[in-house]
Image (cartoon, grey):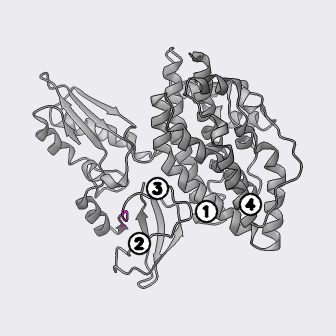
Amino acid sequence: MTDTSPGTDKIKAILSSVSDPEIPVLSVFDLGIIRDIKMDENDHITVVITPTYSGCPAMNMIEVNIRAALQEAGFDNVNVETILNPPWTTDWMTEEGKRKLKDYGIAPPQGSVDKSELFGEDKVVPCPHCDSNSTEMISQFGSTACKSMYKCLDCLEPFDYFKCH
Amino acid sequence: MANPASLVKYVLYLGDNNLILSQRLGEWCGHGPVLEQDIAMTNIALDLLGQSRMYCQYAAELSGSNKTEDDIAFLRKEQEYNNLLLVEQPNGDWGQTLVRQFLFDSWHYYLLHALVDSKDQNLSDIAQKSIKEVTYHLKYSSEWMIRLGDGTDESHKRMQNALNELWRFSEEPLIMADYEKDLVESGIAVDISTIRESVQKKRQDIIREATLSIPEDEFMQTGGKEGKHTEHMGYILTEMQYMQRVYPGQEW
């Protein structure tokens, strides 16, 4: 993320309270979707965000919540801009975000993005509950666009995996 | 210099494929063979709908009027949709849905890889955004082709029937419409000749691994890209557009 103007620290602090409605333990910063914050001399704020998955229905909600959080703090003149390029990747998720995900019971994305490996070896996804590496994928698609379903073969718990994007 | 009308048609072509296929896959919601696959269908539908939305937003912008993405998606007539005939074909059984998906993904994946280099920045951005999602789609539909084709006698038979039924729609994405040819010259549209081999090889490899055979009948049906659709299209739009037609301007 780049800072293009002074005075954005306060804005950042406010925005760190805005979370992903689908995964409430993650803030918009943990997710890496805030790409820029700009504030001009008239306190006009522009927050630039980028969508996670193309069809993620949480994005509209996040936009509304960003606006609401800033308005509550007294900033009435807020513009939320969406950009596509560079496209979001799970590589932008913060280490703290990954730790929070695991504590929440969702296995964080493993390693970097698959560069279109169609039939590559499946990744080892450690169980977020017992840390066993002996897990298997139940389904590539899960309860939201960003997750797959896995099962731990040791503790037998099913769990979600936040897949690489 | 390409004709501006060609760009609008091309953007609609790309967006309409995703929109109509998404609508079709959405019909599986609550009807999938098992819960995981029901969810997979709606996940793929959602990805395609999200991608379609980006194209519709761009088309609305290009139209130069006060049209919105919703007007583009919901208020056109059948002949104004440029989607491939393949994507409007009925779901049939699970096998037919997966064969349709594979024939689509095996083209969509390579198209997007080439569209990244488009001289049109918006199309390049949308392609970059979509590729990772579509990679998951192709992996999924390829695996199901193999699992069911090389499965039981019954699953093999159904997959072969589906392939026989849908094969005549498989070539349409590889035959360029006039608006594509117009845009290829200016580096905006993908020159299909550059991806044809990859698409065909992927299809042949997976179909062979699935122990299925490519139908011998070489007749190929086209027309969707120019708005000439099969009899199924009207029914899809009737359902998809119902709310906006009956309650114009209705919001969620």
**Distance in Å between CA atoms under marks 4 and 1:** 21 Å
At mark 3, the secondary structure is: loop
Which subunit holds the residue at mark 4?
B
- Residue that carries the numbered disc 1 in the rendered image: B37
Which subunit holds the residue at mark 1?
B
Q: Is residue B223 left or right of residue B45?
A: right
- Mark whose residue sits in front, 2 or 3: 3
Q: Amino acid at mark 4?
A: Ile
Residue found farthest to the bottom: A154
Q: Which mark is on residue A95?
A: none
Write the residue at 82% across / 56% down. B214
- Residue that carries the numbered disc 4 in the rendered image: B207
- Mark whose residue sits in front, 2 or 1: 2
Prevailing secondary structure class for the magenta stretch in the rendered image: loop
- Residue that carries the numbered disc 3 in the rendered image: A115
Q: Amino acid at mark 2?
A: Val
Q: Nearer the viewer, residue A20 or B245?
A: A20
Do the residues at pointers 2 and 3 share their chain? yes
Q: Is residue A144 visible?
A: yes
